[in-house]
Image (cartoon, grey):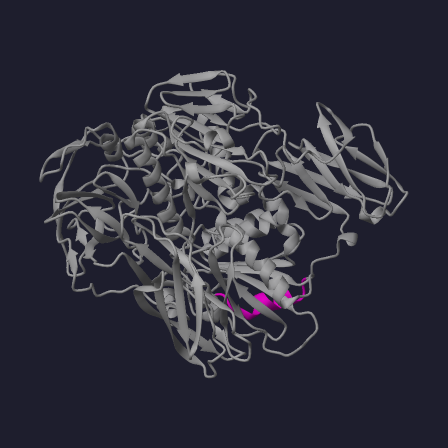
Amino acid sequence: MLNRLFLLYLLPALAGQTLAQTAPPANTYQFTKGLVALTGSRYGREAIYTDPLAYKLYTGTLNPPTEGAVFGTNEQGQEIKWTTVTADSLGRLRLRGTLRGNAGAPAGPGVTAGSMRGGLGGAGGYTYLTYDAPRAQTALLNIRGNSNVYVNGELHMGDAYSMGYLHIPIKLRKGRNDFYARGVMVNASLQFIDKPALLRTDDPTLPSIRLGESNASLQGAIVVINTSEAPLTGLQLTSRLAGREQTTTLPTVPALSSRKVAFGFEGSGVNAKGPQTCELTLLQKGKSLDKASVTVEAVAPVASYSRTFVSRIDGSLQYYAVTPQSSANTSPSALFLSVHGAGVEASGQARAYKPKDWGNLVAATNRRPRGFNWEDWGRLDALEVLALANAEFKPDPQRIYLTGHSMGGHGTWFLGATYPDKWAAIAPCAGYPTLKEYGSADGVIPDSSSNPLEQMLLRAGNQSDVLKLTSNYKPLGVYVFHGDADRTVPVTYARQMRKILGQSQPDLSYYEYPGGSHWFGDQSVDWKPLFEFFRWHEIPADSTVSTIDFTTANPGISSSYRWAGIEQQERPLVYSRIQLNRTKQGITGTTTNVASLKLALDQFGAKTPVTVTLDGQSPITHTTSSAHDTLFLRRDGDRWAVTTRPDRTQKGPHRNGTFKDAFNSRMVFVYGTRGTKEENDWNWQKARFDAETWLYRGNGAVDIVADTDFSLANYADRGVILFGNKTTNAAWKILLADCPIQIERNQIRAGSQQWQGDDLAAYFVWPIKNSQTASVAVIGGTGLKGMRAASANQYFAGASGFPDFMIFGLDMVRSGSQGVRMAGFFDNNWKLVPGHYVVNGQAGKSD
């Protein structure tokens, strides 16, 4: 979390970042009146959501609101009424003296698994707005302070953090248009435009022009908005900076949607530091559609700078920031990876540090200033930037360090425990260890439940529970730094970790800054004793490490430590642990929840007998054939035996499942076109909604294609997100013919289980047969009611847990986990096996 002082400090330092416009254009309609009801919606970091208003909307029982009309009753039996709200001086439609803040956000700390059961309680609310259009026309909708919005029944992303740069193209119908915005203190407007395409420059991704470098092939990214009802194809973007011009061919932008696009520009003509204007022209077949400009910062070689790169996650343009080493020492230097707090740009994070004479500091982005809490795609962004920094600076591999502030303090705890072999030392500043206790705008992760089905769902988030991974810190130096007067992240979190680690951590330093608030100047992160602590820590060579104690919840996220790796688990996403000792004669130790183990035998040499004794069983002897042998062992019941590497078609570190895994490999959205008009409309609108969400939360871009345009050859090794079912999506038979879960109109089958009706839905993942890494994720239902039940996309909330599959009904939207029919995991052979799943109301189905 970020206090106001920190935000004010960082805003001037956002190089190349243009702040959202504050004054509305002349052709804008500002909403000044609406109705609010505290309907009690609950969304968060879990697979279950409840939303009474959405339920009524999806079932056709939502009456148009009027002042004083009763919406329903809350958990205390009190009536929920629609209340008139008017805009204040800042344009916010707020309830006077009733509720402050965005009630569209979920409840904060204290929410437990009980919230998974839903109901009408909670702080969630909706703002109802109307606009009478004189004719059918296109407009840009801008709402700030909402989590999402239904526009004449179509679901769109909201601007939960009030950033101001989410401009949604919508088609207004003649007459009354209805808007249900989830949130109770929103600022809403419509902008009327007369162009088929627009360039938006209030959300750019830009590098610095670093004087002294070539700067001939730089890349930036801005948003292109298609305001027409047909896809925009054949687009080009021409950039002109300091007399140098470049033209970039752009991807298709679907109808009535937005896409962030990368463009090239040349900065070689710039020879003075300071802001530089880059002019942009959007062209289609040589005709200009729109013009705009962005400001790019030129910086001196010794100054902090930003660098852009194409992400392997989705092919979009991202950036990281660098505070370069102050000395010209050419010997291998240290590398410091810094992860920022909520609301902070990576460029501002880097500038908070003075240059060090013994290493370069690199700040990753988490994909957005709030992003994913350094989990999920924030975690992947940190790993991408770490790899890029290693390639650029070629640091001493034994002197790599991790630190971060606030949400980045959590990121430090999380990344440190998840990848302990990547760091010599870590230093969380003003951090909280786990989202199960602290949470943030998306709420906390529920802690526990006595319900077997809820337990299965919660297991999918085990990798986020740092407190279960604290033994992984043992090889690291850990420096904990916290202000003792911090009101945003109380110092009790630091003291909690000091107490836990004090019993087991051999290398721990701890300091509370007297009177320190959440941010007390640069030294909140750039603390000299912290970097001195780093200086005398190094990552030992593998050859010197004879003891391993490593825990993971998901080998698909983190599978190995040095010379040992967990290839497969016995029980999916239950914590697995290996405790091993290596001597000249061999390896001994114990394992927990490990089905397949990998051991690198590099230190034994060629033609050497190696004895492996695990879990008190009879020793296994293996004679190495080379100096770089890798030994694979498989557990069969109570016995370990030598085996070969698990087949890549099985689960493993390369592809271990959970629903969200399909979103990691340059995903493509494939929407169905073979259903009824209403089903096809939902398929397309849901794909567009998820693309809007990915842009807002992840600064990303997605290809959206119709099922009839999809082929495995054209999208090889890319994750697929399929919207629809076997009946409505023609790509189903290509991707899911052999899957044990089948959805078609009015029916879902999962192995021997079967359910009937048009109100059923499912999320599930399945490996793509001709790929060793990519998966398909299915979002669909048996009919329009079921599809609507699948509309929510809190899988984009950082650290939210989703198993391999969950089957649910529209009644889940009203009653929570009671509406889930079945949930769980496939086994290592991607089969449905009793013990790995739970069927609601049936005993004996879970492990």
Q: Which residues are magenta?
A: 525-537
From this view, report whether residue 30 is shown above or below residue 79: below
Q: Position of residue 13 (x, y in %)?
A: 41, 71
Closer to the camera, 471 or 255? 255
Indicate left or right for 27 with 707 as reference.
left
Q: Position of residue 625 (x, y in %)?
A: 87, 42
Question: In which quadrant is the N terminus drawn?
Answer: bottom left
Q: Is residue 548 left or right of residue 30?
A: right
Q: Total number of numbered labels?
A: 0
Residue nearer the viewer, 29 or 653:
29
274, above or below 61, in the image:
below
Q: Is residue 650 above or below residue 666?
A: above
Q: Is residue 76 left or right of residue 424?
A: left
Taking the spot 15% from the left edge, 53% from the top edge, the residue there is 31
Q: Position of residue 710 (x, y in %)?
A: 46, 39
536 within the magenta span: yes
Q: Is residue 234 visible?
A: yes
Q: Which residue is rendered at x = 24% and y = 59% of the image? A: 195
Single out the residue that lies furthest toward the front.
Answer: 285
Q: Is residue 377 magenta?
A: no
Work out whether residue 495 can be spotted.
Answer: no
Q: Quadrant of the C terminus?
A: top right
Foreground pick, 774 / 456: 774
Q: Residue at x 69, y 58 (%)?
A: 539
